[in-house]
Amino acid sequence: MAKKAEAPTQKTGVAAWNEEHGTASRQGKSQSEKRFRIGALVALAAVCVACVVCFLPLKESITRGLWLKEGTAVDITVKAEDGSAPSSDVLNNAANTIRDRLAKTGLSEYDVKTSGEDTITVSVPWNTDASSIVRTVGGAGKLEFARFDEISDADALVKINAGTTDVALKDGSYTSFMDRSAVESASVTNLGNDYYAITITFNDEGKQTFADVTKELAEDSGRIALLVDGVVITAPSVSEEISEGQVSVSGFTELEANAIKAVLDTGSLPIKVTFGDAQQTDALLGKQMLWGLLIGAAVLIVVATVVAATRFGKLALLVGGSLVVYSLLMLGLMALGSRSNMFILTMPGVVGGLCAAALTAAAVWLMVADFHGKIADGRNIRGAAMSAPHDGMYRLLMPCVIATVVCLVLLFVPMPTLREFGATFVLGVVSGVVSVFWFAVTSLRLLAATSIQASPAAWGAKTDVANESAGAKES
């Protein structure tokens, strides 16, 4: 006798509401997460475009330390004020002050290094008057005003009257009537046709002293010599009393005027210096090499992506994409640092950037490898995508933290090479964190909820039917 077919049991009440609205709630949450991740990737794309705008054109945006041609170097031998050998603190302080002065001149390219116990080497571009600029910014920075008619160095007077610039006076051949302590501020003004003037404003005491001296000199059109470390920078004539507490001296190039202002701004150093002859140097890192580095980086990204593809299939795009995002962010940060005179790209800096790039690629590689491993162990696709970033990259966490702390410490050591490496590595870590967590993690979780879920085999995520069904339900 045939059994009567039983009608399917229908859920009612709370059970029916939970089944219907619970499913709808999960679907709504899934769609919300997808929209959030798509929005995050669009925002990242906008950031990358901003970085491209920031670092292009390369030759104008990343210039600090990148020389197109050879430069000129001048060695400065430093002594303490009493003539003894300087301490390491005195030498490093002098180098830092010179570096600061050069930054204030507006030079886009220069290099300041210490060597031995008493030597500072200053390198400037090939088209810069190295001897003049280094003598202005590389000395103690002692600014003085002296009456021209009270200078007793006859040979120097002949040279100055003949139009020679940067004439050094013999010790004891003059007596200054004012020094840096009488100066309140200084500014540079463009007079047009590449001529610049430096305007010096005196404090109350300096205002009165300058008025008294100029009143006396104006009777015979006398002259006042402006000296930096005993070198006559200029010696203008005085035609009338200057009582406003401000004097403007013209006839400088922009670089010369900014150099004098830089000395006024930074003050004097407790040192004595001796300048060596200017020597031609090789390019620090030619700008033409920058394009070579970019092309080399592009080749490495392609190679890394191809190698990853042999193991992860299409998910290798996460490795290549992360390196592309890293490169764009890194160039943007370097351009900002270069424009603000805070960043110098040298070969140690390039190495620091490459090390950070390697860590970025390793982090994404481990994440994708862990994602594949969880799928192979029977984890559903969405669950594997949620846990893989944490589990896969956890092994790199401690080495990255230690390396970053070490490089932050390197920023404060007196060796420029280590500082340059540390600065670029720290910038690279920032770029790497953004590219890994903003791009790679977001992309993996978005793909897991869409393309990988729909076609696991095409993405190299081999799952059985039950596993695929579980992943589909969870999604």
Image (tube, rainbow, N blue to C red):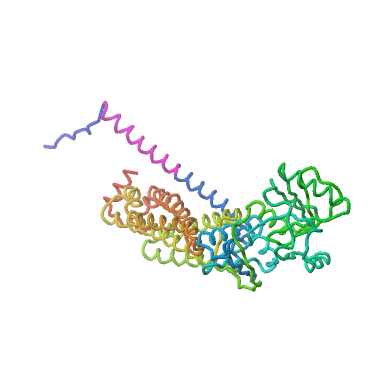
Front in this rendered view, residue 59 or 63? 63
Q: Is residue 321 visible?
A: no
Write down the quadrant of residue 16 in the picture.
top left
- The answer to whether residue 133 is left or right of residue 420 is right
The quarter of the image holding the N terminus is top left
Indicate the position of residue 202 as horizontal and vertical percent values.
72, 45
Q: In the figure, 353 relative to 10: above or below?
A: below
- The answer to whether residue 152 is left or right of residue 272 is right
Indicate the position of residue 395 as horizontal and vertical percent values.
32, 56
Front in this rendered view, residue 350 or 475? 350
Indicate the position of residue 367 as horizontal and vertical percent values.
36, 55
Tell me if residue 221 is in the magenta stretch: no
Front in this rendered view, residue 10 or 35? 35
**Residue at the right extreme of this rendering:** 220
**Residue at the left extreme of this rendering:** 1
Q: In the figure, 11 relative to 140: above or below?
A: above
Indicate the position of residue 376 as horizontal and vertical percent values.
28, 57
Q: Is residue 431 visible?
A: yes
- The answer to whether residue 153 is left or right of residue 11 is right
Q: Residue at 55% of width from left, 67% of height from top?
A: 118
Write down the quadrant of residue 410 in the picture.
bottom left
- The answer to whether residue 244 is left or right of residue 230 is right
Q: Residue at 78% of width from left, 50% of height from top?
A: 248
Q: Which residues are magenta?
A: 13-36
Dominant secondary structure (helix, strand or loop) of the stretch shown in magenta: helix
Front in this rendered view, residue 440 or 140? 140
The quarter of the image holding the C terminus is top left
**Residue at the top extreme of this rendering:** 13
